Image (cartoon, rainbow, N blue to C red):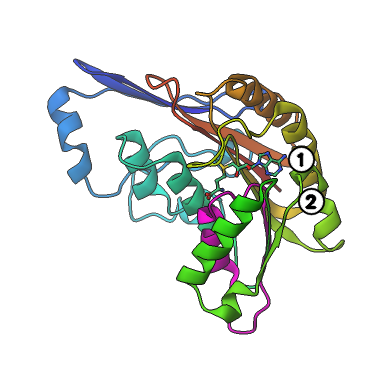
């Protein structure tokens, strides 16, 4: 769990916890209000990355010598290069979905196969398409949603945003995400399966993702994901059933074996209804 707490008059506390590890790492930073106000202007010196579960591999403070290459070994981590976006999130300027998209950038390569398990209005599908599309037309986005209107919205957004060659790299399916294995060709090296749970913004708020089907879909995602890939889940807790679904996602993540998976969440503490980002990274 990565969580942020602010104590307005005295200090700031940031902590990072890996949900499926016996070992918890905690970084605390204290600063005066004056120093806090200056944090944005500090050049990039401190970074926090997770790479594997070995304690030696977790950087919890700035390198003493900024010119040393101690950070370069984390360049393949899904969290490398995320300093700006994480800082934005910590200061309430960036949303969980924006952090998710930035994490994807670190993992997805041109030509990859990725899955959008809840395409909704198409913003996640479009973000994925931009990452996988190449001139050789090798990338693929398999996107699905229960609702026809969601597929229409996604198709329309893609039509406005990319050319027809790129749009053809997206396959849209009106199915439940528990059936993702039926549409992704077996043997595909799937680099990302993304879930953006809850209801369709602007749509029928009674049609929502549900704990039981979400769990089955996560199991399916786990089976098709290639080593080095990610399952990315944005979970909403503000609607009926959302909190239970979050607990289900957390339980699933917490039980993944530490040898193969790094699982973490990014959650606001003083905004209890804010969406939570859960990232499951497969070694
Ligand atoms: C928060 S929206 C997704 C937002 C979308 N990713 C975007 O970028 O606009 C959640 C979507 O999940 C869909 N959904 C609900 N249950 C589903 C299921 N079992 N399988 C697939 N999609 C589902 C809903 O219809 C809704 O469109």
- Element type at mark 1: helix
The answer to which of 42 and 114 lies nearer the viewer is 114
- Element type at mark 2: helix
Does mark 1 have its CB less than 8 Å from ligand 1?
Answer: yes
Q: Quadrant of residue 216?
A: top right
What residue is rendered at 59% in x and 24% in y?
242
The answer to which of 252 and 264 lies nearer the viewer is 252
Q: Which mark is residue 180?
A: 2
Q: Is residue 106 visible?
A: no
Q: How many marks?
A: 2
The residue most toward the bottom is 136
What residue is rendered at 87% in x and 61% in y?
186
C-beta proximity under 8 Å, tags 2 and 1:
yes
Residue at image mark 1:
217
* Residue 247 position within the rendered picture, expressed as x and y whole percent measured from the top left: 65, 21
For ligand 1, give the image quadrant.
top right
What residue is rendered at 67% in x and 49% in y?
145
**Where are the magenta residues, as a range?**
112-139
In the drawing, does residue 93 fall left or right of residue 150?
left
Q: Quick check: is 120 in the magenta stretch?
A: yes
- Up the image or down, 104 lies above or below 207; here it is below
- Up the image or down, 51 lies above or below 214; here it is below
* Residue 188 position within the rendered picture, expressed as x and y whole percent measured from the top left: 80, 63
- Up the image or down, 218 lies above or below 226; here it is above
Circle 1: is it few (<14), some (14-19), or many (20+) Cα within 10 Å? many
The residue most toward the left is 34
Q: Quadrant of residue 131?
A: bottom right
């Amino acid at each position: 769990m990565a969580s942020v707490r602010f104590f307005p008059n005295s200090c700031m506390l940031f902590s990072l916890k890996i949900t499926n590890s016996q070992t918890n790492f905690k970084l605390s930073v204290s600063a005066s209000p004056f120093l806090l106000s200056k944090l944005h202007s500090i050049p990039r010196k401190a970074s926090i990355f997770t790479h594997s579960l070995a304690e030696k591999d977790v950087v919890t403070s700035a390198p003493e010598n900024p010119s040393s290459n101690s950070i370069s070994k984390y360049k393949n981590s899904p969290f490398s290069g995320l300093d700006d976006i994480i800082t934005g999130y910590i200061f309430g300027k960036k949303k969980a979905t924006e952090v998710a998209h930035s994490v994807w950038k670190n993992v997805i390569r041109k030509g990859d196969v990725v899955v959008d398990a809840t395409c909704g209005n198409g913003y996640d599908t479009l973000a994925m398409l931009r990452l996988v599309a190449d001139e050789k037309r090798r990338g693929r986005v398999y996107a699905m949603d229960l609702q026809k209107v969601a597929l229409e919205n996604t198709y329309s957004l893609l039509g406005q945003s990319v050319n027809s060659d790129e749009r053809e790299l997206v396959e849209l399916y009106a199915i439940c995400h528990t059936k993702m294995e039926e549409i992704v060709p077996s043997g595909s090296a799937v680099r990302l399966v993304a879930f953006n749970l809850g209801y369709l913004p602007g749509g029928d708020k009674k049609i929502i993702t549900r704990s039981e089907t979400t769990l089955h879909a996560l199991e399916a995602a786990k089976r098709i994901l290639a080593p080095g890939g990610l399952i990315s889940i944005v979970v909403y807790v503000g609607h009926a059933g959302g909190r239970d679904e979050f607990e289900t996602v957390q339980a699933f993540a917490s039980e993944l074996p530490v040898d193969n998976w790094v699982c973490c969440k990014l959650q606001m503490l003083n905004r209890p209804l804010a969406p939570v980002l859960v990232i499951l990274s497969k070694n």
